[in-house]
Amino acid sequence: MSYPLEGIRVVDLTVVWSGPGATAMLGDLGAEVIRVEGNNRVSRQVSAKTTKESIAQTGYHGGTYPEKDPGERPYDRTALFNWHSRNKLSACMNLDTAEGHAAVIELIKVSDVLVENNSNGTLEKLGLGHERLLELNPRLIVARMPPLGMAGPMSDYLGYGPNFNSLVGIAAMDGYEGEEADSAGENYHMDEAAPAGLAFAVMAALLDREHTGVGGLVEFAQAENVMAEIGEFVLDAQVNGRVPEILGNSDPHVLQDVYLSADEDRWVAISVRSDREWTALASVIGGDELVEMGADTVARRTNSASIRDRIAKWARSMSASEVVSVLQECAVPAGEVMSETGLLEDRHLRERDWFQERSHPSVGTYRYPGHPWRVEGFDLAFGRVLPGFGEDNEYVYKKILGYSDEKYAELENSGLVTDHQIA
């Protein structure tokens, strides 16, 4: 196996989604990613104290556990964490203790990259600000993911994806067609957009280090990153003073929507991007009048609502699989809006071996999502799906940091190094 980032060590101080998603991609490319975790704080989006009883009372996160059972080690069993923990190692280092802090410093000295997406000032409070880290290891690349940058009047804002979707303008465009903004419920697009961008930035910094011999700071403002994905709407508002419409599943440039089939709550997405695709779709539905209604791009835009009503009636008369089959046969883009079960059973994904079956003693054997891309010329890693909490303590402390057996045993006996989370 040949991996592009083989030999690169990443210290992972990330939380929630955007940061862990980014380090997962670096692990896909062969980097050795070590999650630094404290057993006295929640770092896996779930508490060690979660029980069947607490789930029954609150309903919170129940569906993320196999058989809805958090078990004795809920922090190892939650799907919210496990899907992005592939290829990672876990070492217990409590940063608020002198011993844990010293261990992290030693790990940073022998690493290539550090990634964190905590609120501004968190690393500084721990004595791990990037200025100090670069003094300790000038070749280190410190990748920080503040929502709104590290300086400026908004740099101290706290929040999650939905909050910043509102701030950058996504929420003002997000809703069902003809309804109020944000009527479609929460989304976390900032978290979805950040991982690939951060992984690319780290690789660019690694390439730069090949030429300069030194590392440095990568400041990756997540709000700025996600704004690039709606750049045309931002420019339209700035230059032309137009406020974006709430289009729902439709599109300003192509004929597009999502339609209910005859199956209960099974929907199909259909897009028409060209005159050829329109002619094919209209011929399937039938009627010269319909063909004329969408004869060109302007006609399809003008008559969009009426045309989509006709398509909706047609789609409602067949099963979802029939709608997709008929349209794909005439080369019209169509696909079912998949449920989780539908994805697991999807023939296309199955034949491409996208889901990967993996096992772990705390979880059992299940299929997990594969890599977000395929490549030629090098391999992508897909080893252990999840690191059990503290599962790699001995390797990290003894092999990487060079701790003696006696020193390691002392840390274990004092409870500072453990494979059990208590928070």
Image: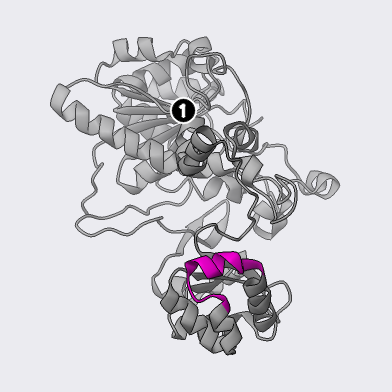
Q: Nearer the viewer, residue 172 or 243?
A: 243
Which residue is at a point 58% across and 29% down the rendered structure image?
Answer: 39
| Residue 113: image location, x then y, percent | 33, 28
| Residue 10: image location, x then y, percent | 35, 32
What secondary structure do most residues of the magenta stretch adopt? helix
Figure check: 128 above or below 184: above
Q: Which residue has dot 1 on it?
A: 221
| Residue 192: image location, x then y, percent | 51, 45
* Furthest residue toward left: 211
Write the start and end of the magenta stretch as one range. Answer: 293-305
Q: Nearer the viewer, residue 198 or 334?
A: 334
Which residue is at a point 54% across and 88% down the rendered structure image?
Answer: 284
**The stretch drawn in magenta includes residue 297:** yes
- Marks counted in the figure total 1
In the image: residue 5, left or right of residue 163 = left
At mark 1, the secondary structure is loop
Which residue is at a point 39% across and 15% down the rendered structure image?
Answer: 130
Circle 1: residue type? Ala
Q: Nearer the viewer, residue 379 or 313?
A: 313
Any part of residue 14 in sight: no
| Residue 254: image location, x then y, percent | 50, 64
Which quadrant of the figure has residue 299?
Answer: bottom right
Considering the image in quadrants, where does the C terminus appear?
top right
Considering the image in quadrants, where does the N terminus appear?
bottom left
Which quadrant of the figure has residue 329?
Answer: bottom left
